Amino acid sequence: MAASYSLFCMGNPLLDMQVTQGEALLKKYDLKANDAILAEEKHAPIYEELVKEHKVTYVAGGASQNSARGAAYILPPGSVVYTGCVGDDELAEQLKAANKREGLDEVYQVKKGEKTGACAVIITGHHRSLVTTLRVAEKFDQSHLSSPQVAPLVEAAKIFYVEGYFLTHGIVCALELSKKVTAAGKKFVLNFSAPFIPQFFGSQLDQIIPYCDIIIGNDQGLPNPKDIPAVAKAIALLPKANANNPRVVVITQGADSTVLVSASAPDSPQVFAVHALSDDEIVDTNGAGDAFAGGFLGGLVAGKSLDECVEVGHKLGGMCVGQVGPQYKWPKVKVL
């Protein structure tokens, strides 16, 4: 384990349980084809059903962890560290193995006797529907950040990344971290993650946005998806604790262009075309947004310009959709 990492990531560690041709599952469990939700009581049986009745591909998941593995993939060893809460079970061991392959170090909080979180990934065509049961992931303790194992890593890191999903239970931890990062003049990056975060966890977002230097999101669930630059501008200009560091907002639109707006030039949005892939090149889209964020973060750590960070994000996102689930090519391909 390195004494200091440039990038510190925090989120919900999950093992993805991925199945294809899931049209019947969408209907049975009242799911949308391209969505991400937290499991309700009616969804509880889906995990056992997948194991019993479908061919399941198990892939390391969790949005921030996917992005952290992406950044680690393109950076030198010892650049990226990740934290979240897992159980002492086989699912956690699978996550550790996937992280090791990509060069990501983790400092999990491990709770004995608890189950690691899981995500049912229902693939239909080029769409994916995510149904998450957080299990022990939502029992992350604030004390873990100040533990002897983790506190020095927080002190040493330069860039910090948190997924929006973490705010559903961990706003206190995320807020503590974001305030500390802002006070130290470092960079705090937040991903909105899914439409239900702004929709149902708006008060949590309102608390943390003032401390966000970079916000990444996608066009799903936005109030005015037809005018992405206007939405990005509105978010960029929200109040900020450290006004000397203008906020940057990056909004992806799947296979369509990516929009970047900086509070330093809110009326000059930048639009970046995405290299189009043929249907034959697309295996599945699960984790593509996380891969984009991982590439973008890797570019930031490497000192690239924002334009270059977007391009690196596009490259890693394009690589990810050619794999099964949120994975990257092996042997490694040079991206930076």
Image (cartoon, grey):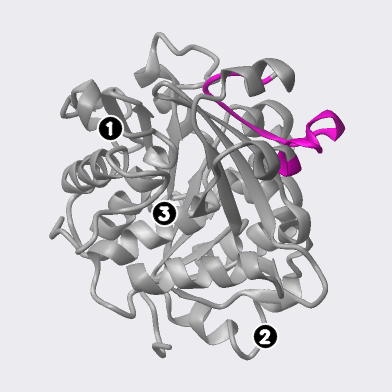
Where disc 3 sits, the SS reads helix
Mark 3, other Cα within 10 Å: few <14 / some 14–19 / many ≥20 = many
Mark 1, other Cα within 10 Å: few <14 / some 14–19 / many ≥20 = few
Residue 158, magenta (yes or no): no
Is the Cβ of the residue at disc 3 closer than 8 Å to that at disc 1?
A: no
> Which residue is denoted by mark 2 in the rendering?
147
**Left or right of 58: which side holds 263?**
left
Looking at the picture, tell me which residue is in the foreground, 159 or 140: 140
Where disc 2 sits, the SS reads loop
Which residues fall within the magenta stretch? 31-48
Residue 314 visible (yes or no): yes
The residue under the point 68% across, 75% down is 109
Rounded to the nearest angstrom, the CA distance separating label 3 from label 2 is 24 Å
**Left or right of 21: which side holds 253?**
left
Amino acid beneath label 2: Ser
Amino acid beneath label 3: Ser
> What percent of the width, then of the height, locates residue 92?
61, 68
> What percent of the width, then of the height, locates residue 64?
50, 54
Q: Which mark is residue 265?
A: 1
Rounded to the nearest angstrom, the CA distance separating label 1 from label 2 is 40 Å
> Which residue is denoted by mark 3 in the rendering?
67
Residue 37, magenta (yes or no): yes
> What percent of the width, then of the height, locates residue 202?
69, 33
Where disc 1 sits, the SS reads loop
Of the 4 image quadrants, the one containing the N terminus is: bottom left
Quarter of image, res 113: bottom right
Mark 2, other Cα within 10 Å: few <14 / some 14–19 / many ≥20 = few
Looking at the picture, tell me which residue is in the foreground, 68 or 214: 68
Q: Which of pointers 3 and 2 lies earlier in the amino acid sequence?
A: 3
